[in-house]
Image: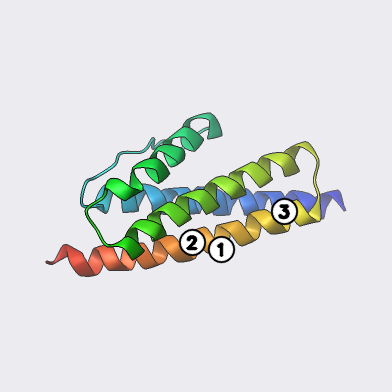
């Protein structure tokens, strides 16, 4: 059982890292660029405040309401996934892991939609 839990936690950690990398790229392509910490291994103590800050300033970006909400939603779902991952690391529970996974799916969907919009509108 522990092996299964370890595999799930590894998968969640990889997904969190992937979504954070997406967010870094998106923030660099926003109309008003936002820099996020980038390193080989970003500790949550650095990433979480940066993600929170992006969610706070999302409404200041000169883009449509839908795109603003996609950025905000992507951030808050990523933050929720990180919180649930941390709880799972302390005491693993399937429901927490599943909640983290669902939040990561939502974050990815929102950020991919925003990334597509940014690419399309970059030429304008």
Residue visible at 54% across and 53% down in the picture: 77
Identified at 44% across, 63% down, the residue is 110
What SS does tag 3 mark? helix
Q: Badge 3: how crowded within 10 Å, few (<14), some, or many (20+)? A: many
Q: Residue at 25% across / 53% down in the picture? A: 29
Residue ID at (42%, 49%): 21
Question: In this rendering, would 40 be left or right of 3?
Answer: left
Q: Contact (CB < 8 A) between labels 3 and 2?
A: no
Residue 93 as seen in the image, left or right of residue 66? right
Residue 117, given in percent of the width and then of the height, sits at 28, 67
Dot placed on the residue nearer the N-terminal end, 3 or 2: 3
Q: Is there any visible trace of residue 41 in the rendered image?
A: no
Q: In the structure shown, which secondary structural element does the residue marked by tag 2 occupy?
A: helix
| Residue behind mark 2 | 108
Could you tell me residue 89's position as x and y percent? 73, 40
Determine whether 6 is above or below 50 in the image.
below
Residue topped by disc 3: 97
Q: Secondary structure at mark 1?
A: helix
**Residue 88 in sight in this render:** yes
Marks 2 and 1, how far apart in space?
Answer: 5 Å
Q: CA distance from mark 3 to mark 2?
A: 16 Å
- Location of residue 87 with respect to 67 vertically, above or below: above
| Front residue of this view, candidates 86 and 72 | 72
In the picture, the disc for residue 105 is 1
């Amino acid at each position: 059982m522990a092996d299964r839990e370890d595999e799930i936690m590894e998968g969640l950690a990889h997904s969190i890292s992937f979504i954070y990398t997406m967010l870094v790229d998106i923030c660099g392509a926003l109309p008003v660029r936002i820099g996020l910490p980038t390193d080989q291994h970003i500790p949550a103590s650095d990433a979480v405040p940066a993600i929170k800050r992006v969610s706070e300033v999302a409404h200041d970006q000169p883009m449509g309401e839908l795109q603003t909400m996609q950025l905000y939603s992507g951030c808050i779902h990523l933050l929720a996934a990180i919180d649930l991952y941390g709880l799972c690391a302390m005491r693993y529970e399937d429901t927490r892991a599943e909640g983290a996974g669902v939040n990561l799916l939502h974050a990815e969907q929102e950020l991919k939609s925003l990334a597509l919009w940014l690419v399309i509108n970059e030429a304008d």
